[in-house]
Image (spheres, rainbow, N blue to C red):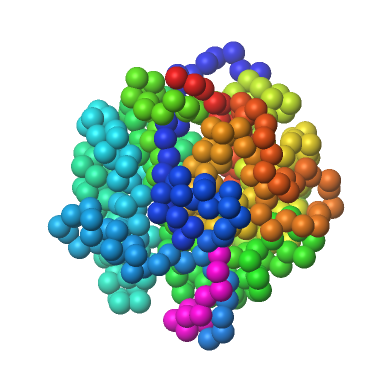
Amino acid sequence: MNTIKSEAVFFAEGECITPLGWTLQKNIENLKADKSAITEVKDKNFAENPFYGAVLNKEKLNQKFENLAYQEEFSTLEKMILLASENIKNTYENALKDKCGLIISSTKGNITALENEDISAYFLSNLAQKIGKALKIKSQPIVLSNACVSGIMAISVAKRLIQSGAYNHFIVIGADLFSKFVFSGFQSFQAISKKPCKPYDKSRDGITLGEAAAVAFITKDKEKIKNKTYFEIIGDSSINDANHISGPSRTGEGLFQSIENAKKEADISAEKVACISSHGTATLYNDEMEAQAFTRAKLQEKPVFSLKGRFGHTLGAAGLLETVITLKFAEENLIPPSFNYEKHGLTLPLNISSTFQEKEMDIILKTASGFGGSNTAVLFKKHHS
C-alpha cells in the first residue's frame, strides 16, 4: 500500500442535461419514478425503420438556451454544454478566475458540422476554445477524447493536474450528440439493440445510443465547496490493455489493473467499496469482460449497476454523466438498480443491483472501458461539510 499521500482533490458538485431531465435533480426524480430517457425514435434522418435511442428535444433545448442571453451563435452541442454549465458557472464564478482549468471530454464533438462540410466547426480544439470563452475561463482548454473512457478519465486528469500545482480548480465537461455518423457506425458492427439495452441480462443484444451533457466542478479548496455533501477523489488509474481496436480483453486485464492501481493509491481493500457504477454497455463481450475484472479484483459481491438502461450510451459524456448521477444517489445513501436487468446473463456470479437499495455509501468505484483497449477506474470517498 502507498505511504506517500498526495494533496486531496474533491468532486464538489455536478450537473447534467439529458432527455430524461434538464437538471440533475430532475433526472434523479425521474429515475426514482422509473422513467427512461430511451424511447422509440422514428426519424428517417437516422434510419428508415424505428429504433430505440435517448434523444433530446431540440425545440425545448433552443427555448431554454434563449433564456441564457448569449449573443454569439452556438451549435446544438455547444448549447447543451452551456445550458448544463450554467448553474456551476454561477455558483463558482469567483473560482473560475483562480487558476481554473477546463477539460472538454467528447468523442465526436460537433460531428454534425461535417454534414454541412463545415470542417473548422468540427475541430474539437475550436469547440473547447469557444466554450472556454463563453464560460470566461482564461486558461488554455484541454480536450480529452479517448473513446468511451473520456468522461471519467477527465476527472482523473483534473485531479492529477491539480495535484501537480498547475491548477486550483477544474470545470470538467462531457458531451456528445446522437448522430447519424455514430449510429451508422455501431449498426455496421451489428451492435445496436433491437430494444432498450439490458446490461448484464441474459437476453442482452447490444447497446442503445444516447446524447447528454454533464459538468463537474473539481477543486482542492474545501472552502470553495457549496454542497453539504461532497466527494474526495481518493484513487484513479487508466490502463490500456491494447487487446483489440474494438473488442475488450477476455480476461479484463486492463480494467482489473486500473481498479487495483486505484485501490493502491487510495490505500483501501476491496471490502471498503460500497458499490460499483460500471460501464455496462449490454454488449456480450463488454459485460462479460467486466465480470472477469470485478471478480479478479475481489469485488464480485459488491452491488454493481449500469445506468445505460435509462440513458443509453452517451459516448464521451457517459463516464462523467454516470458519475454525476451515481454521486447524487450516494448523497442519499441509495444504490440504483441496473435498469432493465432481469435474468443473469454472465458466466460469473456478479451481484447485479436489481432494485433501489438503501445502504451507507462511503466509498464508490466508477469504471469505464472503451475501444482500443482503454480502461479507467476512479474511487470516490464521501464527506460532509
Above-or-below relation of 247 to 273: below
Q: Tell me where the magenta segment starts and ends, as one range.
A: 38-47
Question: Residue 138, how many percent across, how many down?
Answer: 21, 39
Q: Looking at the image, which residue sits at the far bottom?
A: 48
Question: Residue 17, how many percent across, how many down?
Answer: 42, 53
Residue 45 part of the magenta segment:
yes
Question: Which image quarter is the N terminus in?
Answer: top right
Question: Residue 287, how many percent across, how many down?
Answer: 71, 54
Question: Which image quarter is the C terminus in?
Answer: top left
Q: Is residue 74 left or right of residue 246?
A: left
Q: Let me know if residue 164 appears in the view.
A: no
Q: Residue at x 73, y 48 (%)?
A: 354
Q: Residue at x 69, y 58 (%)?
A: 340
Nearest the eye: 270 or 341:
341
Question: Residue 169, how many percent across, how many down?
Answer: 34, 30
Above-or-below relation of 1 to 200: above
Q: Residue at x 17, y 59 (%)?
A: 72
Q: Is residue 291 left or right of residue 85?
A: right
Q: Is residue 20 left or right of residue 215?
A: right
Q: Looking at the image, which residue sits at the far top?
A: 3
**The quarter of the displayed image where residue 357 is located:** top right
Q: Residue at x 30, y 76 (%)?
A: 117
Nearest the eye: 152 or 372:
152
**The quarter of the displayed image where residue 60 is located:** bottom left
Q: Let me know if residue 113 appears in the view.
A: yes
